Image (spheres, rainbow, N blue to C red):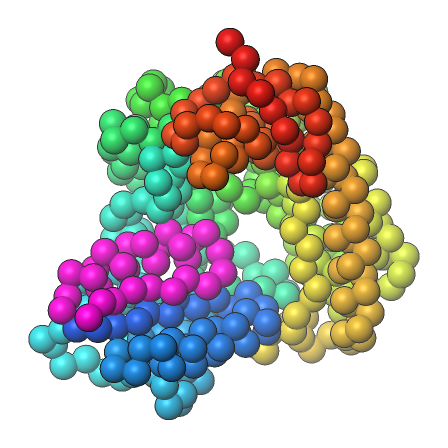
Amino acid sequence: MSSHVINMGCRLNAYEGDLVERLVTKQSRERVVINTCAVTAEAERQNRQAIRRAAREHPSAEIIVTGCAAQINPSAYANMTEVTRVVGNEEKLRPETWDPTANHPQVSVGDIFTVKETAPHLLGSYGDRTRAFVQVQQGCDHRCTFCIIPYGRGNSRSVPIGDVVMQVRELVESGTLEVVLTGVDLTSYGPDLPGKPTLGQMVRRLLAQVPNLPRLRLSSIDCIEIDNDLRRLIADEPRLMPHLHLSLQSGDNLTLKRMKRRHSRDEAVELCKELRILRPDIAFGADIIAGFPTETEEMFQRSLDLISDCDLSYIHVFPYSEREGTPAARMPQVDKLLRKERAARLRLAAEEAHQTFLKSHVGKKANILMEADGIGRGEDFAPYKLDAAQGTIVSVIASHVQGNQLIAEEVQ
């Protein structure tokens, strides 16, 4: 018998799923835990598909559903015949939830908005000795009109700086070369902690107190919340990697307003220009939604133009997906086929931008962190293919682009 976790969706889910797996594999009972995602209707469909597949492949196992979709709509999953139990996002990280001797209710999902403490989440890290993800923030206080995730994650809460430092120090001592700080709304870090530290202040203290950490990277951030300490670190701290993934969502001001985003198009463009002056080698990624309610062709074109205006190198494209219970679901909808067509156009432009980004590296020296299967990542997250040992940082020069990778050779 064996137990395992199937993670759907984001890296934060994978991080938490790794913690859950450590808890469930200690028990003798066979269990399959589906750690669900709720970000789109397609994600919900994939959740149900994964549950049914797990039940077919493990007919004697308990099928336990957790994650954001289970937190938001527990009854929908409890009513599936394949499902044994439904567990909330907060409950899944408690050891007692997985006690095989206890008499558990079918649904264990509490009110996520009553949760104030983040310490239980900081039980470890997700990843390997090459790169590890450390959760420093949970939940979100903003209510973007398209987003259901706050109802799965609760309000924003931050991990104390001392706990972050302790976790990262342990990872470095075990051989980790790069740490990625992650959260639901990373740049909202700090207001709930004593002294109200900002994300930049936390990062500065972390780098000062773990001087032997080679590389630190940030996950997705909100461009309107970048504080001055973080700006100075981007400019002056070589251990903070020159790669930021921005939650932009649209390049049209009216769409941004209807999304209830807090930045304008001009603010996003100016931020990218400012940070590129501070750190000329910086690369930007972004999330962009295609076909948001009321989006006209002119509005969409402004999102398309944002790729060049911000000089984006990596773009995650999402066709808009209605989420029941959100304000955007009640707005006039764009035809689904048109959403897909616009998303395809965005992806084509994104691919062209990524190719231009890769070609700019040819003939240049870079420091690469080697991962599995001969793939390494540059400081700006550019992917390199070369023959070098996993878990090492090597200096290389790229000779040419092949597909979506740079072919490189190690140099002394």
Question: How far from the left and from the top, in percent, is residue 247?
Answer: 62, 48
Question: How far from the left and from the top, in percent, is residue 104?
Answer: 19, 80
Q: Residue extending furthest front?
A: 387
**Drawn side of residue 290 relative to residue 278, left or right:** right
Residue 90 part of the magenta-drawn span: no
Which of the 4 image quarters holds residue 167?
Answer: top left
Residues in magenta, as a range? 1-28
**Drawn side of residue 205 relative to residue 290, left or right:** left
Q: Is residue 200 visible?
A: no
**Drawn side of residue 344 relative to residue 19, left or right:** right
> What quarter of the picture does the N terminus occupy?
bottom left
Q: Residue at x 44, y 84 (%)?
A: 76
Question: How far from the left and from the top, in percent, is residue 401?
Answer: 70, 32
Q: Is residue 378 above or below residue 33?
A: above
Work out whether residue 297 or residue 191 is closer to the camera in this orientation and state it: 297
Question: How far from the left and from the top, in percent, is residue 258?
Answer: 73, 62
Residue 2 part of the magenta-drawn span: yes
